[in-house]
Amino acid sequence: MIRIAAVGDVHLAPDASGHLRPALEELGDCADVLLLAGDLTKHGTVEEAEVVAREFGGLAVPVIAVLGNHDHHSDQGEELSTVLREAGITVLEGNGVVLDVGDRRLGVAGVKGFGGGFAGKCASAFGEREMKAFVNHTAEVSAQLGKALEELDADVRVALTHYSPVKETLRGEPLEIYPFLGSYLLAEAIDNARADIAFHGHAHAGTEHGMTAGGVRVRNVAQPVIRSAFKVYSLEPAELEAAS
């Protein structure tokens, strides 16, 4: 069994310093790894990243993260990533990492992702250069995710994004903003690489459970959805179940 703890959208700032740490100190008893699904800060400042580093650094389990749209708001994504890496947090963007968990190898590939919508109701790379740039960015990061997943030499392969790969986990959000919450291109990459499970955040009013067209289970772990400091999922070869 591989026990994956996950949370996203914690939106930390100096006034929230230390709020999550007491719960996180218990991770070693219930999880093998912690995944952070983006929007770790409120406004993407280095000062906020330092709060994230203190909160999630030095835990009993490895911590793997992707950034979210809030983390890029101040155009300091690289600086934020540096702060987190210096605290021992692995930050992914178009790449992956493999961990030994007992006698199994757990691979995690991650990208922030982007919007565009879902099959039948999505944007296309046609018309103004701004629209083409929007859609082409989603296509590019989705391709990066697929490649990173395929290159993982692991028994279990996990996709970690901020934006959603499926519309099912967006239920509860206004339909009008679905195109800004995720893209089916992420799901295609996940399916083509035959990932075992996918985690994302971003959809605060969405729902936890979804599935790609190819049958890969998707979990929205935005903190407003899971309503806890993290949630733990137990992954078996043929079964995934939420652990209490």
Image (tube, rainbow, N blue to C red):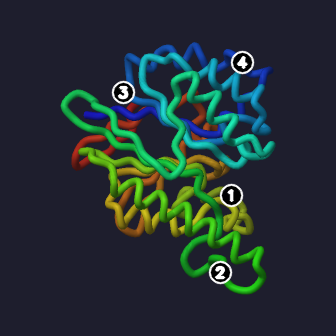
- Where is residue 120 shown, x and y percent of the image? 57, 81
Q: Amino acid at mark 3?
A: Asp
Rendered-image quadrant of the C terminus: top left
Query: Nearer the viewer's eye, disc 3 or disc 2?
Result: 2
Query: Nearer the viewer's eye, disc 4 or disc 2?
Result: 2
Who's the residue at 74% across and 22% down the image? Answer: 16
Up-down relation of residue 212 to residue 36 (above or below)? below
Q: Amino acid at mark 2?
A: Ala
Residue under circle 3? 32
Which of 40/30 is in front? 40
In whole angstroms, how far apart are the C-alphas of marks 4 and 2? 42 Å
Up-down relation of residue 225 to residue 176 (above or below)? above
> Callout 4: few (<14), some (14-19), or many (20+) C-alpha neighbours within 10 Å?
some
Residue under circle 2? 125
Residue under circle 1? 173
Q: Which mark is residue 187?
A: none
Which of 195/204 is in front? 195
- Where is residue 73 shown, x and y percent of the image? 78, 46
Q: Considering the numbered disc 1 on the image, is that residue within a helix, a strand or a loop?
A: loop
Which of 224/135 is in front? 135
Who's the residue at 73% across and 46% down the image? Answer: 72
Mark 1 or mark 4: which comes first in sequence? 4
